[in-house]
Image (cartoon, helix red, strand yellow):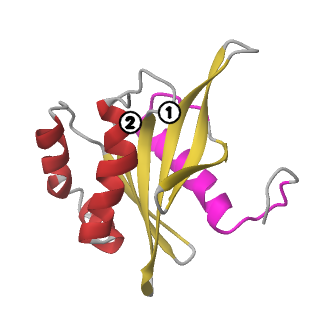
Amino acid sequence: MASALDTIAHVVLPNLMKLKGAATLVSAIERRDTSPFAQVWQQTGVAHTPQVIAKEKNDYRIGVMSLPAPKEMGEAYMCAFVAKKNDAAITRYFTLEHDYVLATKQNKTVLCEREGQRTAKKGDGPPITGDFQTDATAFVDALMEVISPTKVNPNRSY
């Protein structure tokens, strides 16, 4: 059974983005206004005060929000709402998820994107340092590599 944090990251927040629109959520994050997300924490009973940061890269506005610290594999450290500047119809939703490699017995992160009703792994994510600003910037850089790649990855299908 999915945990509350898993449900928030993979069902509740993507649905909120569909209802309110990514541009609206990114605008709120740009103002450092977390009130559009307040009902998520109230209705799920999860105590969390999210940290937010907004970035602009190329033609995209990106709002990054911290999530409660993951305890299980597949739970997310943070999520990103992506809106194209001049085209409100182009939106994307990414998560930076916790993973564990049994062979090396080490934690790592995985960059994932919501595609319709499923979540697709897009590759390894940046390591978590514990500093939200640093981690959010690295997360944005990693997701921008998925949106508009600057280098060829032989393990990725384009």
Over which residues does the magenta segment extend? 127-153
Amino acid type of the residue tagged 2 in the rendering: Asp
- Residue 85's spot in the image, x, y percent? 44, 81
What's the residue at 24%, 56% (across, down)?
A: 32
Report the residue marked by disc 1. Answer: 74
Residue 38 bears which disc, if any?
none
Is 54 on the left-hand or right-hand side of 125? left
Quadrant of the frame with the C terminus: bottom right
What's the residue at 11%, 40% (across, down)?
A: 42
What's the residue at 36%, 57% (across, down)?
A: 14
User: Is the Cβ of the residue at disc 1 closer than 8 Å to that at disc 2?
Assistant: yes
The answer to whether any part of residue 2 appears in the image is yes
Q: Is residue 25 located in the magenta-colored stretch of the structure?
A: no
Furthest toward the top, the residue is 105
Amino acid type of the residue tagged 1 in the rendering: Gly
Residue toward you, 15 or 81: 15
**Element marked by disc 1:** loop
Q: Is residue 149 located in the magenta-colored stretch of the structure?
A: yes
- Residue 20's spot in the image, x, y percent? 24, 69
Q: Earlier in the sequence, mark 1 or mark 2?
A: 2
Label 2 packing within 10 angstroms: few (<14), some (14-19), many (20+)? some
Residue 91 position (above or below residue 87):
above
Q: Determine the CA span between mark 1 and mark 2.
A: 7 Å
Residue 75 figure quarter: top left
**Element marked by disc 2:** helix
Report the residue marked by disc 2. Answer: 6
